[in-house]
């Protein structure tokens, strides 16, 4: 057990080091490129020195200085070329460059024994940019060795212009004087500089480590917030939770588009029983994790209460008491809650400080429905919530939303507003509720442009379907078949069959209609789509002469084409393509029912 | 229904686009039958046909009857649903499909 823990610890340390190493490696490459620039500048300076030396401007041994400048120049070119070739991204680059710098500077120092004391500190200054204490120490040691040697050799050979301060009787005494009185103080000064560089390297290193841990922490927080966002979105029910569209008398769509932060908007819809649909839209004040948690709590309380108490006013009262009891100072939620009787269209709703719903009466325009407002939930102890009743007729649309819609702002801080919202609703109400919501969302987005939005945008729309959407009345003209086909295509999705089957249905309808149009003498033809759980039917009624297509004798399909009569073929196709067919005569109407079984995977 | 015709000497290729049904078949008949004069090879491309109803079958049969007198007729790029209709009506055995 202990072993395992140790092993895991090692692995996690390794992983961490791996990330840290990565950061320092990136830093090292940058440092390499920085030193590279100084090396290039150094080479240019050396070039200048060479020229100055040629004109005898420098008061040193020209021949020796020329040799030293030239070889330093050439030595520096090596790491410059190498570093440029690998773009600074190799481990050996820093050692190569530093070795060349130390060599060149020490070599030059030999000829300028007394003149340029600062040369000795350049390598350590370069080294501290690597934020590596070890590398700074290595550089300091190498510099000490190289400069001691160069100084000693320079003094012994009395190269350059001998310093009169150290003149002695013997050569060895002169060397000792130079080393003790000139180099030693210089080296001590160098030690101080090296110490400072060491500290800079250490601080830099710590700063990088700290920065990295901050970044890691931020990443973690961001990940958690994203996770919270996703969980929040997942507690909102998808429309597929409802019975399949063909078994519903309403069309419903809902969407929550979260702003950048985790917010507190939510919607909900629950079929309490086959005749009642509960609808909720709510907005928790404030943003962030606290709002998200409050939203989760409010949603659970509302959901569980609705299932036992199907009265919006009573539900809001009870949930308000519970939320207030949690005494979360200052937190509250606005809720619009409605229960729709799907058979009568009666909508009972209660509003706890939420935006007014918008309602569109069939063939009218969207209007705000100003129901009675109660106080927000969680705001005060014993609040009463008045219930409002209204009746939705077939074709009417109810739209509820959160303030993210009317309060969306454009770059000049102007708000989308209710007028624009109503206009947008009117513009998109012709299609499905999904299209309505997407249309409004698109308009809001177009209005907002680049302006950042801080509020979640949540919408829920429900439409009581007109039952006659499932019916089509035709005149007995061949042209009308096209209308029938368009109508069939529009209800195609509700048929729950494959494309191939849908085409077979289209062919059958074509055959049946052309028969009626041509032969029955009817003046009205009615088509009706009757959806079911496992099968769907098309009922075709006409008020023409009595005609049972099922009595027509099938043609002999194996006889050669040329010898066949074509009549009856259409009816035969229909019978083969539909899973069940039936005919009856009622009150002067021929009623033909063609049924298809739903295909698997299309329920 | 849209028709596109390509004629080369005495061979004619017709591309159908849409439904070949009770509405479109009479139009196609009026547009195609006069063209068949002197044609020895007729090719019908059905790749863009949604479906063929009995009225469409009737047109195909009519064209087949004409072409048997003066050359041959082949159908090409027949979609699944059309193939199915040919099969249940027994057309498959009597028409040439490429």
Image (cartoon, coloured by chain):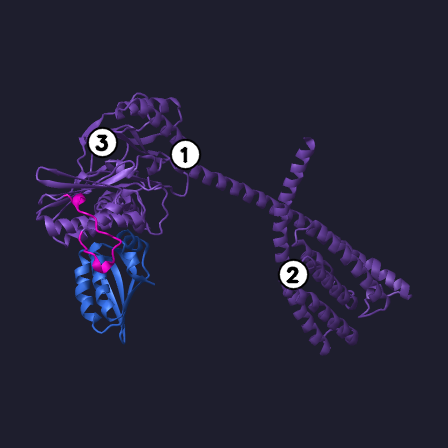
Chain colours: A purple, B blue
Q: Main secondary structure of the magenta part?
A: loop
Q: Nearer the viewer, mark 2 or mark 1?
A: 1
Residue A425 higher or lower than A83, as above or below: above
Q: Nearer the viewer, residue A41 or A593?
A: A593
The quarter holding residue A602 reads top left
Work out which quarter of the rendered image holds the C terminus of chain A and state it.
top left
Residue range corresponding to the magenta coloring: A548-567
Chain under label 1? A
Disc 1 packing (10 Å; few <14; some 14–19; many ≥20): many
Measure the C-alpha gap from mark 1 to mark 3.
32 Å
Residue B77 seen in render: yes
Chain under label 2? A
Q: Earlier in the sequence, mark 3 or mark 2?
A: 2
Residue A399 seen in render: no
The residue tagged with tag 1: helix, strand or loop?
A: helix
Residue B64 higher or lower than A358, as above or below: below
Which residue does the numbered mark 3 point to in the structure image?
A: A342
Work out which quarter of the rendered image holds the N terminus of chain A and state it.
top right
Residue A312 higher or lower than A494, as above or below: above
Disc 2 packing (10 Å; few <14; some 14–19; many ≥20): many
Q: Nearer the viewer, mark 3 or mark 2?
A: 3
Which residue does the numbered mark 2 point to in the structure image?
A: A35
């Amino acid at each position: 057990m202990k072993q395992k823990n140790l092993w895991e610890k090692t692995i996690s340390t390794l992983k961490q080091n791996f990330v840290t190493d990565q950061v320092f490696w990136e830093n090292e490459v940058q440092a390499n490129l920085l030193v590279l620039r100084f090396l290039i500048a150094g080479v240019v300076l050396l070039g200048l020195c060479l020229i100055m030396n040629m004109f005898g401007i420098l008061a040193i041994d020209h021949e020796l200085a020329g040799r030293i400048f030239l070889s330093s120049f050439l030595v520096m070119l090596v790491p410059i070329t190498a570093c440029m070739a690998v773009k600074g991204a190799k481990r050996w680059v820093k050692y190569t460059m530093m070795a060349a710098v130390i060599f060149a500077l020490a070599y030059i120092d030999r000829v300028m024994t007394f003149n340029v004391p600062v040369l000795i500190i350049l390598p350590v200054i370069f080294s501290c940019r690597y934020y590596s204490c070890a590398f700074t120490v290595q550089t300091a040691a190498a510099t000490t060795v190289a400069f001691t040697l160069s100084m000693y050799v320079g003094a012994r050979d009395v190269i350059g212009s001998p310093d009169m301060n150290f003149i002695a009787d013997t050569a060895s005494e002169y060397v000792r004087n130079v080393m003790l009185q000139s180099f030693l103080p210089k080296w001590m000064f160098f030690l101080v500089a090296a110490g400072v560089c060491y500290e800079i390297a250490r601080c830099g290193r710590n700063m990088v480590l700290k920065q990295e841990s901050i970044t890691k922490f931020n990443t973690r927080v961001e990940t958690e917030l994203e996770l919270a966002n996703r969980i929040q979105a997942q507690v909102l029910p998808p429309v597929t939770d409802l019975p399949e569209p063909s078994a519903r008398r309403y069309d419903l769509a809902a969407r929550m588009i979260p702003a950048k932060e985790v917010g507190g908007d939510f919607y909900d819809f629950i079929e309490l029983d086959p005749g009642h649909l509960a609808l909720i839209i709510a907005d928790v004040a404030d943003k962030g994790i606290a709002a998200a948690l409050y939203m989760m709590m409010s949603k659970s309380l509302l959901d569980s209460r609705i299932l036992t108490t199907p009265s919006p006013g009573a539900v809001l009262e009870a949930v308000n008491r519970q939320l207030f009891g949690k005494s979360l100072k200052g937190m509250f939620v606005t809720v619009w809650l409605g229960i729709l009787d799907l058979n009568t269209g009666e909508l009972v709703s209660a509003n706890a400080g939420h935006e007014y719903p918008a309602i569109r009466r069939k063939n009218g325009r969207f209007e705000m429905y100003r129901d009675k407002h109660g106080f927000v939930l969680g705001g005060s102890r014993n609040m009463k919530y008045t219930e409002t009743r209204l009746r939705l007729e077939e074709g009417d649309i109810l739209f509820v939303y959160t303030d993210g819609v009317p309060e969306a702002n454009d770059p000049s801080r102007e708000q989308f507003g209710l007028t624009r919202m109503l206009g947008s609703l009117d513009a998109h109400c012709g299609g499905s509720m999904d299209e309505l919501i997407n249309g409004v969302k698109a308009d809001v987005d177009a209005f907002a442009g680049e302006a950042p939005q801080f509020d979640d945008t949540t919408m829920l729309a429900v439409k009581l379907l007109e039952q006659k959407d499932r019916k089509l009345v035709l005149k007995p003209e061949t042209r009308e078949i096209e209308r029938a086909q368009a109508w069939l295509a529009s209800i195609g999705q509700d048929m729950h069959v494959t494309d191939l089957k849908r085409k077979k249905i289209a062919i059958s309808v074509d055959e049946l209609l052309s028969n009626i149009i041509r032969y029955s003498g009817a003046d009205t033809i009615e088509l009706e789509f009757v959806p079911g759980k496992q099968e769907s039917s098309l009922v075709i009624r006409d008020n023409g002469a009595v005609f049972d297509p099922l009595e027509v004798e099938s043609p002999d399909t194996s006889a050669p084409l040329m010898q066949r009569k074509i009549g009856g073929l259409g009816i035969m196709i229909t019978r083969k393509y539909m899973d069940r067919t039936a005919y009856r005569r009622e009150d002067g109407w021929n009623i033909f029912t063609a049924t298809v079984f739903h295909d698997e995977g299309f329920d | 229904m849209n028709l596109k015709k390509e004629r080369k000497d005495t061979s004619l290729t017709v591309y159908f686009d849409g439904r070949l049904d009770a509405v479109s078949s009479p139009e196609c008949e009026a547009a195609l039958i006069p063209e068949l004069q002197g044609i020895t090879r007729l090719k019908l491309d059905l790749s863009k046909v949604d479906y063929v109803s009995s009225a469409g079958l009737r047109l195909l049969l009519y064209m087949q009857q004409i072409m048997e007198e003066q050359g041959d007729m082949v159908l090409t790029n027949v979609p699944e649903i059309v193939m199915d209709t040919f099969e249940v009506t027994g057309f498959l055995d009597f028409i040439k499909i490429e």
